[in-house]
């Protein structure tokens, strides 16, 4: 079904026009066959996963296909799925199901590129109380449900217990506050300094005040640095009790909490020396490779997601490690802060077989298939109830920690706003400038607030023009 051009934002119209004149890949441009030789309806499912994650979902697809004789799901791995799904939807030939990232749902929904699931969910009796709340909420926008979870994640502090022990720290006692994190990071940091013409290794606290002031040393090991891996810099304010918008129309980039978070971020190059950190960081490999500074023993602590177990198991299985809530500015008032993320399943607008597509999504979101999928990807289930067998069989020894964090009242998400990617990019620029000591946190965040609020206001004015029609359309 072709979407009416008059109902689309300018960007979506541009994509629509581009698709009209572009040649899409043969597998996507041709109308798929509707039926298998034995009469089943074929449901086309595009997914971004590769490797063992793809294999885990393929096993669920195979189980579903074997469980009934009406529907046949065909899974296709698609790179750049977010762009290709939008193009296919604009061109009137989307897949029946697409596996996306939760943070992208808002953007697609506001562009009318998704099918609301409300009526199908109501008919199936699927409600919010079936899920860990944060993962249901990630799928909702403007009072409508646009997706259901597939595999979830939460973030936690990972620490190297051997490095703790070698530094004289209790390997079973991670930091609980930002102040403790900073103090432990100093004790875990090893430098090379010249004394009496000789290079010697010392821990950072053993440097003289003059050596610390001059920063005339080389970093050999860091206890921690907030720029590694740097994937969630825009969200550091969460651990300082802040937020980055009011949930409606006002951004809060330059709130006192966010300024405090960025000031903390900048304290690391100020303390250890920007050139020293840059030189040391030049040897870091990809966080998901054997050259990851955490896996290679170059950094003792890192903020990472539940997926980190996979890389530890693959590249550094001998590592003694732990996982716990990343410390906040106040452990008593602000415990168990995390960022919850997730993969989701959506039905693009114009899908040829939405009812059959939902049957598969519903199947994935039942306890048995969901636990099999999440166990295959070494994650936890987004469902409110998990079996004892699932926990017992799970290879990640800290899987309960990630589940507890996801259930925490302080589990936060990326903002559910259509300009999030713009906002995130602006925050990334600001953190880059502050981290290289080019500006102050207050000035950087004031710039983000001004530039991004203006863009957000413009988007919201356009939204106001179509909101009434959209809400009526989604409620039909």
Image (cartoon, rainbow, N blue to C red):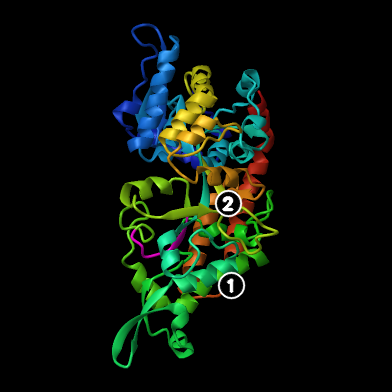
Residue hosting label 1 = 443
In the image, 266 versus 220, the foreground residue is 220
Q: Quadrant of residue 83?
A: top left
Q: Label 1: state its secondary structure.
A: helix
Q: Which residues are magenta?
A: 296-303
Q: Name the residue furthest bottom.
A: 196
In this rendering, position of residue 187 left or right of residue 140: left
Q: Is residue 210 above or below residue 296?
A: below
Neighbor class of circle 1 (other Cα within 10 Å; few <14, some 14-19, many 20+) is some
Q: Position of residue 88 (x, y in %)?
A: 42, 31
The furthest residue to the top: 38
Tell whether label 1 touches label 2 (CB within 8 Å): no
Task: Name the image quarter holding residue 54.
Answer: top left
Q: Position of residue 340 (x, y in %)?
A: 56, 46
Q: Is residue 63 shown in magenta?
A: no
Dot 2 corresponds to which residue?
A: 338
Compared across the picture, whether 71 is left or right of 470 comes to left
- Depth check, front residue: 223 or 57: 223
Name the residue at 61% across, 33% down: 384
Residue at 48% x, 69% y: name it: 185
Q: Is residue 421 visible?
A: no
């Amino acid at each position: 079904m072709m979407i009416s051009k008059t109902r689309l934002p300018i960007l979506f119209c541009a994509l629509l026009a581009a698709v009209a004149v572009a040649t899409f890949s043969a597998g996507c441009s041709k109308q798929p066959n509707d039926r298998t030789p034995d009469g089943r309806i074929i449901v086309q499912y595009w997914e971004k996963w590769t490797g063992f994650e793809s294999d885990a979902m393929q096993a669920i697809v195979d189980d579903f296909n074997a469980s009934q004789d009406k529907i046949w799901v065909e899974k296709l791995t698609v790179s750049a799925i977010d762009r290709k799904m939008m193009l296919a939807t604009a061109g009137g030939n989307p897949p029946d199901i697409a596996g996306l990232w939760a943070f992208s749902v808002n953007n697609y929904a506001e562009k009318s590129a998704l099918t609301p699931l409300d009526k199908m969910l109501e008919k199936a009796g699927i409600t919010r109380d079936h899920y860990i709340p944060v993962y249901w909420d990630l799928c909702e926008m403007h009072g409508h449900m646009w997706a259901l979870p597939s595999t979830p994640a939460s973030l936690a502090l990972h620490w190297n217990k051997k490095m703790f022990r070698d530094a004289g720290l209790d390997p079973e006692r991670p930091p609980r506050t930002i102040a403790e994190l900073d103090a432990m990071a100093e004790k875990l940091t090893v430098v090379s300094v010249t004394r009496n013409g000789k290079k010697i290794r010392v821990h950072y606290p053993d440097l003289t005040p003059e050596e610390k002031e001059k920063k005339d040393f080389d970093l050999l090991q860091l206890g921690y640095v907030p720029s590694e891996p740097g994937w969630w810099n825009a969200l550091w304010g969460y651990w300082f009790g802040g937020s980055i918008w009011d949930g409606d129309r006002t951004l809060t980039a330059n709130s006192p909490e966010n300024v405090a978070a960025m000031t903390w971020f900048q304290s690391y190059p100020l303390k250890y020396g920007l050139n020293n950190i840059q030189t040391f960081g030049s040897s870091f490999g990809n966080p998901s490779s054997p050259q990851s500074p955490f896996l290679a023993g170059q950094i003792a602590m890192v903020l990472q997601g539940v997926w980190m177990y996979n890389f530890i198991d693959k590249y550094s299985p001998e590592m003694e490690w732990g996982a716990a809530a990343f410390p906040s500015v106040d452990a008593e008032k602000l415990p168990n802060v995390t960022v919850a993320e997730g993969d989701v399943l959506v039905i693009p607008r114009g899908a040829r077989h939405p009812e059959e597509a939902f049957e598969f999504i519903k199947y994935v979101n039942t306890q048995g298939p969901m636990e099999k999928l999440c166990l295959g990807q070494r994650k936890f289930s987004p469902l409110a109830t998990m079996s004892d067998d699932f926990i017992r069989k799970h290879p990640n020894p800290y899987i309960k920690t990630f589940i507890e964090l996801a259930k925490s009242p302080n589990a936060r998400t990326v903002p559910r706003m259509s300009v999030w990617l713009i906002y995130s990019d602006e925050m990334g620029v600001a953190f880059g400038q502050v981290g290289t000591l080019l500006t102050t946190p207050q000035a950087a965040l004031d710039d983000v607030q001004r530039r991004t609020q203006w863009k957000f206001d413009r988007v919201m004015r356009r939204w106001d023009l179509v909101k009434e029609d959209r809400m009526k359309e989604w409620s039909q």
